[in-house]
Image: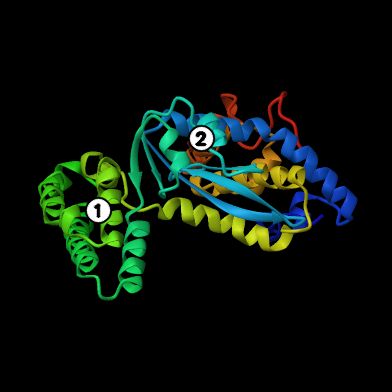
């Protein structure tokens, strides 16, 4: 059993972990159990927020297909293992979320009772494939061209003003105009009729970002988070077990959340802390202290703020 890729990027001596395989395996097992609650806290913080990105990817274990789910914000990431692609895990993990969920078009995400933003890059790819598969279908070309023009105008606004609804709401008029341009079912080919039905069905989930601040129109954040697992998958796929994958995912959740938050993963491990929010607060306090003039740092130390000292309840792994 190897150390995860996210640990291999650092000298193993900094973790003080011997190289023997059994020792590394036991270390991983104990660390995963220690930080299991940390991952739950990460998800709890996400659910309190206004935006979550979600995605899933396949993994093969001993010839059987399983799935890894990722939930991400711009500050936190959490990974989960599941033997099926059913939506039960998503419903349990995101229970109580009232913000905007950005995802692809997989139906499991629709079971979450919150505002939805579907990835428009996925939609454009599907439209382009439909055009290539039906080169003589003028109706599909009309739909694809009209959608591309609509999205091009919206992207220009986001490039200039960012993801601010007060500048994007004006495009709701363009959205209504786009739907009027779609040929009606009676004059469409079977392939184009499917697209007309799909666009109408997902209408309330395609342009949610126009009415919410800070909501992107793509799912790049979740797809970027998936890449961190993909690098790990190349190392362990086919060799690990469900339990081993879950242990890796717990540690990867902590590692990536530290990275997103701007803190070193190994420093977090060495701290003995299990709550990333508490660790972040201590790191910011330390940085503020280090930026003070020397005489002020001395007074802070004499007042009991001893930078780098461990509290009586802190432990190390």
Number of numbered labels in the structure image? 2
Q: Quadrant of residue 114?
A: top left
- Report the front residue among 146 and 281: 146
Q: Residue furthest front?
A: 186
Q: Secondary structure at mark 2?
A: helix
Q: Quadrant of residue 182?
A: bottom left
Residue 271 spot, x, y in % from top left = 67, 38
Q: Quadrant of the C terminus?
A: top right
Mark 1 closeness class: few <14, some 14–19, many ≥20 residues within 10 Å: many
Q: Quadrant of the N terminus?
A: bottom right
Pointer 2: what residue? 285
Residue at position x 37%, y 58% from top? 122
Mark 2 closeness class: few <14, some 14–19, many ≥20 residues within 10 Å: some
Pointer 1: what residue? 196
Ranked by sequence position, the earlier of labels 2 and 1 is: 1
Seen in the image, is 180 located left or right of residue 260?
left
- Report the front residue among 268 and 295: 268
Residue at position x 17%, y 62% from top? 146
Residue 16 spot, x, y in % from top left = 80, 50
Seen in the image, is 238 located left or right of residue 83?
right
Seen in the image, is 70 located left or right of residue 245?
left
Residue 62 spot, x, y in % from top left = 77, 55
Alpha carbon separation for disc pair 2 and 1 = 55 Å
Q: Is residue 189 above or below residue 212?
A: below
Label placed on residue 254: none
Residue 107 spot, x, y in % from top left = 44, 42
């Amino acid at each position: 059993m190897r150390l995860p890729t996210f640990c291999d990027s650092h000298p193993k001596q900094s973790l003080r972990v011997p190289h023997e395989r059994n020792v590394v395996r036991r270390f991983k097992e104990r660390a995963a159990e220690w930080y299991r609650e940390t991952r739950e806290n990460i998800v709890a913080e996400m659910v309190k927020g206004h935006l979550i990105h979600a995605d899933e990817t396949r993994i093969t274990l001993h010839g059987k297909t399983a799935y890894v789910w990722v939930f991400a914000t711009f500050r936190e990431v959490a990974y989960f293992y599941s033997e099926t692609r059913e939506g039960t895990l998503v419903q349990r993990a995101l229970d109580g979320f009232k913000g905007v969920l950005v995802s692809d078009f997989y139906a499991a995400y629709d079971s979450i009772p919150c505002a939805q933003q579907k990835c428009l890059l996925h939609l454009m790819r599907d439209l382009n494939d439909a055009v290539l598969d039906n080169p003589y279908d003028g109706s599909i070309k009309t739909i694809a061209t009209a959608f591309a023009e609509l999205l091009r105008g919206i992207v220009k606004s986001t490039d200039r003003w960012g993801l601010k609804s007060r500048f994007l709401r004006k495009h709701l008029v363009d959205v209504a105009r786009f739907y009027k341009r779609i040929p009606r079912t009676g004059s469409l080919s079977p392939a184009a009729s499917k697209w007309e039905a799909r666009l109408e069905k997902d209408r309330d989930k395609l342009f949610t970002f126009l009415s919410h601040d800070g909501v992107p129109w793509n799912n790049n954040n979740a797809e970027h988070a998936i890449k961190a697992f993909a690098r790990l998958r190349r190392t362990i796929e086919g060799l690990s077990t469900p339990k081993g994958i879950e242990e890796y995912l717990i540690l990867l959740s902590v590692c990536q959340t530290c990275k997103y938050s701007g803190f070193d993963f190994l420093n977090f491990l060495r701290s003995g802390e299990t709550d990333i929010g508490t660790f972040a607060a201590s790191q910011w306090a330390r940085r503020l202290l280090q930026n003070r003039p020397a005489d002020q740092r001395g007074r802070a130390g004499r007042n009991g703020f001893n930078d780098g000292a461990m509290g009586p309840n802190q432990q190390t792994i």
